[in-house]
Image (tube, rainbow, N blue to C red):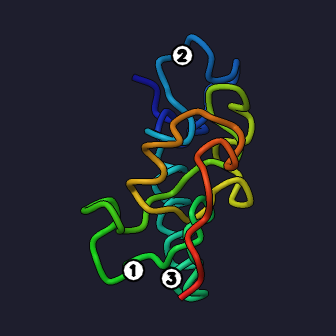
Amino acid sequence: MYEYEDRLPIRPAHGYRNSGVKPGRTTATWRKLRLQCFKRDKAANAPCWICGGSIDYDAKPSSHDYAWEPDHRHSVKTHPELAEVPENVMPSHRKCNRAKRDKAAVNELGRRTRAW
């Protein structure tokens, strides 16, 4: 072990591919960004960007279908370089995010709910 190992960058110098690290899902940078985005979205009372419905920000994130869960506007699979960019992280319901999966377009899921 090198004495400077604790100061090495979180991201591998050669990129994420074939490194075993999953950007936007498992890094320390992602965990910090996830919390930052939750605070941003809660303060704005942002609706789900997929269905337009209100999100239960009082619930623990990802704890039930209508709780907040971060969604990548551009899939991490196809755009790994955007995985930890705050503007690419959108507020969504857990249910909507998991239904969307890696699909790029929101319109593929159907109609938005009406505004209450």
Residue at 68% x, 31% y: name it: 80
Looking at marks 3 and 1 on the same chain, the residue that comes earlier in the sequence is marked by: 3
Q: Which residue is mark 2?
A: 19
Q: Are marks 2 and 3 in contact (CB under 8 Å)?
A: no
As helix, strand or loop, the secondary structure at mark 3 comes to helix
Please state which of the two labelled residues, at mark 2 or mark 3, is closer to the viewer: 3
Residue 88 vs residue 34, the one in the foreground: 88
As helix, strand or loop, the secondary structure at mark 2 comes to loop
Amino acid bearing label 1: Tyr
Instruction: Tell me which corner region of the image, top left, top right, bottom left or bottom right, holds residue 14.
Output: top right
Could you tell me how far apart the alpha carbons at marks 3 and 1 are, in whole angstroms?
Answer: 6 Å
Could you tell me how far apart the alpha carbons at marks 1 and 2 are, in whole angstroms?
Answer: 34 Å
Could you tell me how far apart the alpha carbons at marks 2 and 3 are, in whole angstroms?
Answer: 33 Å
Does 74 sit left or right of 110 as displayed?
A: right
Residue at 51% x, 29% y: name it: 22
Please state which of the two labelled residues, at mark 1 or mark 2, is closer to the viewer: 1
The circle drawn on residue 42 is: 3
Amino acid bearing label 3: Lys
Looking at marks 1 and 2 on the same chain, the residue that comes earlier in the sequence is marked by: 2
Q: Position of residue 45 (x, y in %)?
A: 55, 86
Name the outermost residue toward the top.
18
Q: Position of residue 32 (x, y in %)?
A: 50, 60
Residue at 62% x, 26% y: name it: 77
Does 108 sit left or right of 10 as displayed?
A: right
Q: Local crowd at mark 2 within 10 Å, few (<14), some, or many (≥20)?
A: few
Location of residue 116 with respect to 16 vertically, above or below: below
Residue at 73% x, 32% y: name it: 79
Q: Position of residue 105 (x, y in %)?
A: 71, 42
- Quarter of the image with the N terminus is top left
Q: Which residue is mark 1?
A: 57
